[in-house]
Amino acid sequence: MKERTLLVIVLVTTALLAAGFWVAANVNLMPAEASTRAALVDQLFRAMLGLAAVIFLLVEGLLLYSVLRFRRSKGDEGDAVPVHGNRALEIVWTVIPALIVVVIGSYSFRVLAASETREADPIVVNIHSRQFSWSFEYPAEGVTSTDLHLPLGRQARFLITSDDVIHSFWVPEFRVKRDATPGQIAELLVTPSRLGAYPVRCAELCGVGHASMGLSSQAVVESPEDFQSWIEKTRALSNDPVTTFNTMGCNGCHSLAAAGAKGVVGPVLDGLGQRAGSTASGQDAATYIRTSIVKPGDQIVPGFADNVMPRNFGERLKPEQLQALVDFLMAQ
Ligand code: CUA
């Protein structure tokens, strides 16, 4: 009898471990791995998923076995055998989970330490978020963009902040997510390892346009040569009003055909030049448009909420950018 029990334990343990390894090797719930960090995170995730599968099958299996094996038989009205503790069992079910926690904890710490290792000569990108868009500033290159372009294989150092409320920078394919908090700068290191374009999402409910923050910007990983030519092309366009319109995030809230913008949070801007001179404010069209950009609270269009549009465009736009933007909107 004892030998049979031992055999059952050995067989069940083998089957559970085999199931755990199978799950770890074959179940993939993650999107593409587009950074060196993603490979490390996925290994950890697979190990934990395999372990969780073993524990799930063990616990549910014991439960099912007990329900069937110890169920009340017909006509049995007696009490069950009273059991007062089992020291060996209690030690086992305390020590094993404690060991699992220690192993997962130290493995996770190693993955975290490895993914935050600094490499030489990173490309620095200041990431700004606001209701409801992202912009990516490359201080060394003198360029700002609505898309996050990155050269393949070179570490990127993101410095993330917010102009208004808390947002959260999230690129699932890089396996990174970090809060963008007003008044603080959060650092994040990513080394892209796969060519392609991946959506940049916002992972913090930040207002009526939260969902659209996941539609407006992409993380584009490209070869160092393509990246360099993109930098040069973007730099040449830095005072172009359509570029300004999109990099400043106007497209996140407004729709405007000439800029390819489809935002739904703020007023439609198509035809603005024609109607801007006849608003209730009594200003001429150019003044009305300029005021709407730098002091948006002074003239809220009926039906739209106050305190949605950022108040700092007066500081963020260079005078020539603002002028070009006003001229451009006048022509709409
Ligand atoms: Cu920004 Cu949600």
Image (cartoon, rainbow, N blue to C red):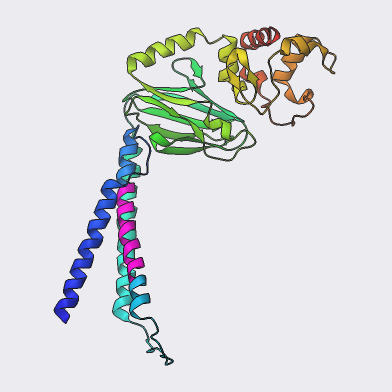
Residue 102 visible, this orientation: no
Residue reaching furthest to the left:
3
Residue at coordinates 17% horizontally, 74% vertically from top-left? 6
- Highlighted range, magenta: 45-62
The residue lying toward the viewer, choosing from 274 and 204, is 274
Q: Which percent across, then down, holds residue 106?
A: 31, 52
Q: Is residue 141 above or below residue 310?
A: above
The residue lying toward the viewer, choosing from 229 and 212, is 212
Please say whether residue 59 is one of the residues in the magenta stretch. yes
Residue 332 visible, this orientation: yes
Q: Which percent across, then down, holds residue 176?
A: 42, 37
Location of residue 117 (image quadrant):
top left
Location of residue 312 (image quadrant):
top right
Residue 111 in the figure: left or right of residue 187: left
Q: Which percent across, then down, holds residue 101?
A: 34, 59
Residue 20 in the figure: left or right of residue 181: left
* Image quadrant containing the N terminus: bottom left
Residue at coordinates 79% horizontally, 23% vertically from top-left? 299
Residue 93 in the figure: left or right of residue 21: right
Residue reaching furthest to the bottom:
78
Residue 251 in the figure: left or right of residue 193: right
Location of residue 213 (image quadrant):
top right
**Taken as a whole, is the magenta stretch helix, strand or loop?**
helix
* Image quadrant containing the C terminus: top right
Please say whether residue 124 is one of the residues in the magenta stretch. no
Q: Is residue 88 above or below residue 308?
A: below
